[in-house]
Image (cartoon, coloured by chain):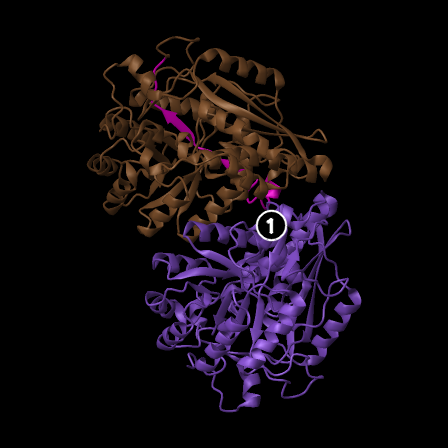
Chain colours: A purple, B brown
Amino acid sequence: MSSHAIRHVRVTPIAFRDPPLLNAAGIHEPWALRSIIEIETDSGLVGINESYGDLPMLESLARAAPALAGLSPWALNDMETRVAALVTPPAQTASEFLGQQVSLAPGTHVSKTMAKVISAFEVAMLDLQGQMAGAPVVDLLGGAARASVPFSAYLFFKYAEHIDKPYAPDPWGEALTPEQLVAQARRMIGEYGFQSIKLKAGALPPAQEAAALLALAQAFPGAPLRIDPNGNWSVATSLAIVEQLRGVLEYYEDPAPGLDGMAAVARACEVPLATNMVVTDLAEFRRNAEMGCPVKIVLSDHHYWGGLRATQRLSLMCQTFGLGLSMHSNSHLGVSLTAMTHLAASVPHLSYACDTHYPWQDDEVIAGGRLRFERGSLRVPTTPGLGVTLDRDALARLHDNYLHCGIRHRDDLAQMRKYDPTFTGQQPRF
Amino acid sequence: MSSHAIRHVRVTPIAFRDPPLLNAAGIHEPWALRSIIEIETDSGLVGINESYGDLPMLESLARAAPALAGLSPWALNDMETRVAALVTPPAQTASEFLGQQVSLAPGTHVSKTMAKVISAFEVAMLDLQGQMAGAPVVDLLGGAARASVPFSAYLFFKYAEHIDKPYAPDPWGEALTPEQLVAQARRMIGEYGFQSIKLKAGALPPAQEAAALLALAQAFPGAPLRIDPNGNWSVATSLAIVEQLRGVLEYYEDPAPGLDGMAAVARACEVPLATNMVVTDLAEFRRNAEMGCPVKIVLSDHHYWGGLRATQRLSLMCQTFGLGLSMHSNSHLGVSLTAMTHLAASVPHLSYACDTHYPWQDDEVIAGGRLRFERGSLRVPTTPGLGVTLDRDALARLHDNYLHCGIRHRDDLAQMRKYDPTFTGQQPRF
């Protein structure tokens, strides 16, 4: 066993093209940041993972990496204790950040630092464990409850091109009208086979977004539909829109800001509410439970919930309190998607198709290139560990992107101000 | 991997001597029942476990065993699904059983059948996984958060001898007075080195039991003390006794019956309440949480909580709701104790020394004989799997006990009626 002791941790920041996707906070910048984590043992095994790539995260990973020296890849509890000792959590709570721009991406909350670093290391250690045990990660998580994991078509309103034209326009074109959005959906569903549809909203006037969703309902009869304004609607707007969408929504994701806002919507709305904004950690889970569970579906994300095992535990908590469970996503590549797939396959209680931004990326860091969906689902790897390895040329190229892209923190608000200097980002906007 | 497919499940009921220990339900019978589970793979590996041995449990295990045929030992989720399909849960809920004699031993609740069978198989499959991966079970659970697991001295009021004299009297002698109980504690702590003390109560008049606990407090200054009347005291008695024990108790275990009774005690009592009677499954966990957590410490037991991984998940739920966690025990041998030790070592949140009946048994089924405690703690095995194997001669002998002991269901009430035909078992008695 000692020959498998961890001797080195390497973190490589990367950047890849991201389209001009609109959301409540503003608009995606031309480059999305991630980090690739490699954990190497004395015996020469390498476990990999993918996580956030903003500067504070990179600094936290660097601060925590010495925690792993000499550890067995099995020693996840030890790793957590050591990371906790090196990464001091800030005094703020996640809820203090709600309503701010970062609330779009719970993974960027400073309060999540410890859970994010633990997750970043845990998945790479599980990859090592799987290689050592000759078993896929899903087996280390209790085995596959399903052979493949369904994802949803994640639609965005978008511009045709980034304002600063950093590279050639993406092939998706503009999507601002219902017709353009339906075309986007047809293209994405045609390529990936998704069976359900999520619309990122909170960007355009709500009536326009509702019209787009109704057009989707007409174009894809029977497909489960969701809309996610990222808390950018008032309670009154949330209730007015859900009335227009009567009979159409599978669930209603974060219409109004804050748990209290969500609770106010829940009191007058039959559609179950989902969230990746107001139940993003255990304290918030408890508060929701103590309020009688106004939020009925938790959109988990192992990147900030503390890892694959922590998300499995969240799953049991959801079962206990009668909550549904699905998965949230940020812009990411194939290592994250593969880890999500192992996790989602191992969670019997997964109640909905998972979110993924994957179709919006056109690059990849794993050997063999882009992962292939079948009817909107990914098959769970059956080879030892995560079952994916790094394409080192791609990694070097994506790292080079990082070095030259000039972005070190995600800032959709500042980016939107380039298009519209009067844009305040104040929420709820509508 | 296919060479490790499960091909056979063997369940061997066993019986071993159990002293005449008094409790709220009556008195222990001269023989305690358990089952030894062996799961064998095509490749000849054998994973073992120990569970309940009453006839309904044996029947459930027999009904569920075909579920395992051909499964990979990694396929715990599959196993659970298959077991659920074969073992139909009864309509009754655990709480319907509260106040009845079986409430002493939550593992005997019919409503727990599925969780019990899943646990019985899960531990043996984890033993197989560990052998396949070359890792101790604790590593499959995230690695050791502690190198050894503390247990407490579990004291009982008792008679010197069983009424029907089935075998020579045990060496512990009678314990009905405070002096006799202190002597019992000195002997047990002398042999095992326990650092904390639990007194099983609810058997003698409460004032007599309180006097015994105060004598223990005087004899073992600084040792954490607990008392467990198994819900056999009224709320008024519970409050009167805790007043007498002011400043002495670490926690107060199941003084009054039912969650409502416990909540009534909690409202007027500063000592935290612990339970293995009113929070014994997820539905009861939720009810306690929804009531604002009158019960502050869950005494878990992997045998009826659904296994080692399920208990780890319970641990996170306890953390989330600010609850403490420790472990409950029934009469058992070394396989159960070893599984508890792996589990307890893997749970960072374990807040108290665990219960164990182990000192009351004088027999063993594992190779190498009785497990040895150091300062009241057990070291976590570091060899692959559970790290213990069966002594086949001992297994045959203990199975022979089972065949001849005549007991097929635990019935402390009927046993007590042999001593006192007027004993009704009605609860709360005091």
Residue type at mark 1? Arg
- Name the secondary structure under disc 1: loop
Q: Which residue ends up furthest to the bottom in the rendered image? A: A421
Image coordinates of residue B296 in percent, x first then y, are 35, 46
Q: Which residue is drawn at 52% across and 29% down?
A: B63
Please count the marks in the image: 1
Q: Can residue A297 be seen in this view?
A: yes
Q: Looking at the figure, which quarter contains the N terminus of chain A?
A: top right
B141 in magenta: yes
Magenta range: B138-160
Image coordinates of residue A63 in percent, x first then y, are 62, 64
Q: Looking at the figure, which quarter contains the C terminus of chain A?
A: bottom left
* Placement of B83 over or under A219, stated as above or below: above
- The chain identifier of the residue carrying mark 1 reads A
Q: Camera-side residue: B98 or B223?
A: B98
Image coordinates of residue B236 in percent, x first then y, are 19, 37
Which of the 4 image quadrants contains residue B178? Answer: top left
Q: Which residue is drawn at 49% across and 54% down?
A: A314
Image coordinates of residue B147 in percent, x first then y, are 57, 40
Q: Is residue A287 left or right of residue A44?
A: left
Mark 1 crowd level (few <14, some 14–19, many ≥20, 10 Å Cα): some
Q: In this view, does B250 lie to the left or right of A47?
A: left
- Reading the image, the residue beneath label 1 is A146
* Placement of A306 over or under A393, stated as above or below: above
A321 in magenta: no
Q: Residue at x 72, y 50 (%)?
A: A383
Which of the 4 image quadrants contains residue B69? Answer: top right
Q: Is residue B269 visible?
A: no
